[in-house]
Amino acid sequence: MNIDLTSLVFSKLTDDSDVSMFTCSDSEDLEDFLRNDAKTRQHEKISTTYLVHSGTELVGFFSLSMGCIVSDHVKKMLPAVEEPPQKYPALLLARMATRDGMRGQGVGYEMLKHVFALAFILTDQIGCRFVKVDAKKDPRTIRFYETYGGFVKITEGDDTVQMVVDINKIVDE
Ligand SMILES: CC(C)(COP(=O)(O)OP(=O)(O)OC[C@H]1O[C@@H](n2cnc3c(N)ncnc32)[C@H](O)[C@@H]1OP(=O)(O)O)[C@@H](O)C(=O)NCCC(=O)NCCS
């Protein structure tokens, strides 16, 4: 299916949202999360999920939570300050996926732009310096975050790479 990016509609997941058709064969975890856990997590106020539709088709989703970053991991990215905090507040992009058959058409980039727009609204009200993602340790995923979001790697785990982007840098660009 060809997607017209100008007609994408972003909405918050609700109890009535039909997410049963969302498939993500690259990651059963992401598919299972959206289909089975996202609504409960939202009620528990652990994550808030946003859906992206093209017409009636659900083409992508992402989930956001509060997060933080250990200062040592980002100190090279920031000007030296006399008493840096031990941790920096961050918006955590906890999950994101484009539906099978619809990747590589720009939906992911549109989702990232939406995340950044939400981050700008947040930072006006609440301290929040970074957007953070625990990216799947897959070269294509990592390159996607680097190229389309300006994220940089800060730490590596067994299966994921912690990546961040400084919200001030996004504003400046
Ligand atoms: C990562 C992901 C959300 C990007 O969404 P998207 O709609 O494919 O992204 P876009 O079309 O805006 O950008 C395409 C870029 O993403 C890269 N990409 C990363 N994973 C990809 C995938 N599985 N399929 C196609 N493109 C992918 C492409 O290389 C492409 O880069 P290019 O333009 O330089 O060729 C999506 O590919 C996806 O859902 N992947 C599987 C789940 C996943 O890994 N989620 C992230 C968990 S941290």
Image (cartoon, rainbow, N blue to C red):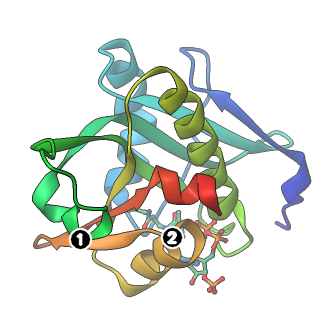
Disc 1 to disc 2, C-alpha distance: 16 Å
The spot of residue 166 in percent (x, y) is 42, 57
Q: Amino acid at mark 1?
A: Lys
- Work out which quarter of the rendered image holds the C terminus and state it: bottom right
Question: From what the image shows, is residue 17 above or below residue 154?
Answer: above
The residue positioned farthest toward the front in the image shown: 82
- The count of marks equals 2
Asked whether residue 45 appears in the rendered view, the answer is yes
The residue shown at (59%, 65%) is: 100
On the picture, is 21 further left or further right than 75? right
- The residue pinned by badge 2 equals 150
Which residue is more in the foreground, 83 or 63?
83
Q: Quadrant of ligand 1?
A: bottom right
Q: Earlier in the sequence, mark 1 or mark 2?
A: 1
Question: For residue 108, what is the image quadrant?
Answer: bottom right
The spot of residue 92 in percent (x, y) is 35, 43
On the picture, is 172 further left or further right than 145? right
Which residue is more in the foreground, 127 or 156?
127
Within 10 Å of disc 1 (Cα), the crowding (few <14, some 14-19, many 20+) is few
On the picture, is 74 further left or further right than 139? left
- The residue pinned by badge 1 equals 76
Asked whether residue 19 appears in the rendered view, the answer is no
The residue shown at (84%, 57%) is: 5
